[in-house]
Amino acid sequence: MKAPLKLLSPAKSAPMPRAVMGIHRLCKAFTVNRTVVPVLEEISFTAATGELICILGPSGCGKSTLLNILSGFLQADAGEVLLNGKPVMKPGPDRCVVFQEDALFPWLTVEENIAFGLGGGLFRRKKVRAEVDRFLSLVGLLPFRDYLPREISGGMKQRVALARVLILKPGVLLMDEPFASLDAQTREEMQNLLLGLRETFSHTILFVTHDVGEAATLADRILVMGKNPGRIEADIQVNLNRPRRREDTDFHRFCRKLYERLRHQG
């Protein structure tokens, strides 16, 4: 089932403002069969307001662990995460996560899923309805507001998941391979939608992926991670013009260099 998708044309990248998130010398290890296994070692970088950073690396390099630390779901063994200069100690509404699985409430409609985070008396009913209508329109799902998750496609579910966090107006959006399970056409649609929404809301986005083409399509910067333990091996500024076309020579050249870099990290 396909729904009309509202795509917004992204503009060329603008100069990045001040850092909103600072990650300093993060380390994390897990104990497996009484053996301490280092997962992350000395991870440091900053993310500016409105910047879209892709975290790219082979399976097992600690990308999802890093995102869980940034979200506050997991505590680092050493180092610190600062958001607007304040330590991140736990999950909060200033950071929202979109996972690979949509994690929608199956008993709630599309509209009710998107409105869920606005409960608790924070908004009057009319204001909630107006906000939900706005975000349903932005993600192209107005005609599907009364559908249950089981009645819509995988791509539509991810649009609902995206709208559900964006309506909370977080400063930072953390995305853990959110389009990995989608077919190629739907995945491209979702990438375009994300870029358009990013131009509208100017969120800082940290996007975990193992897909070189996806990283080259989306990112202002790409952090390439190695593993055993996970480290940032390269911090690459993406200077390709927007909108980016996969058939362009410069795009192919950039992806080849990224593949070459990843081959040495696997």
Image (spheres, helix red, strand yellow):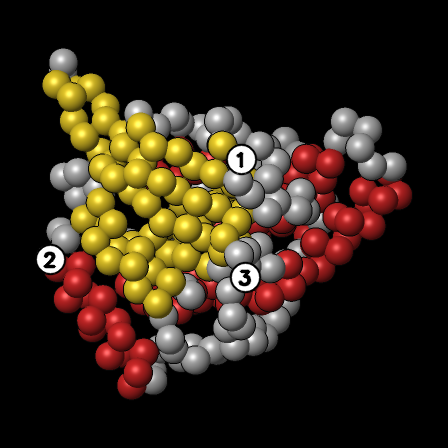
- SS of the residue under disc 3: loop
User: Contact, CB < 8 Å: mark 3 with mark 2?
Assistant: no
Res 223 → quadrant:
bottom left
Check disc 3 and give the amino acid type: Pro
The residue labelled by disc 3 is 17
Give the mark nearer the N terminus: 1 vs 2: 1
The residue drawn where x is 69% and y is 35% is: 116
The residue labelled by disc 2 is 264
Check disc 2 and give the amino acid type: His
- Compared with 5, 248 (above or below) is below
Give the mark nearer the N terminus: 3 vs 1: 3
Q: Residue furthest bottom?
A: 249
Circle 3 packing at 10 Å, graded few (<14), some (14-19), many (20+), is few
* 139 relative position to 30: left or right: right
Measured Cα–Cα span from mark 1 to mark 2: 36 Å
User: Contact, CB < 8 Å: mark 3 with mark 1?
Assistant: no
Residue 36, x across and y down, in percent: 16, 21
- Judge by depth and name the residue closer to the eye, 87 or 129: 87
Residue 190, x across and y down, in percent: 50, 61
Measured Cα–Cα span from mark 3 to mark 2: 33 Å
Residue 4 in view of the camera: no
The residue drawn where x is 38% and y is 62% is: 221
Res 240 → quadrant:
bottom left
- Judge by depth and name the residue closer to the eye, 148 or 162: 162
The total number of labels drawn is 3
The residue labelled by disc 1 is 86
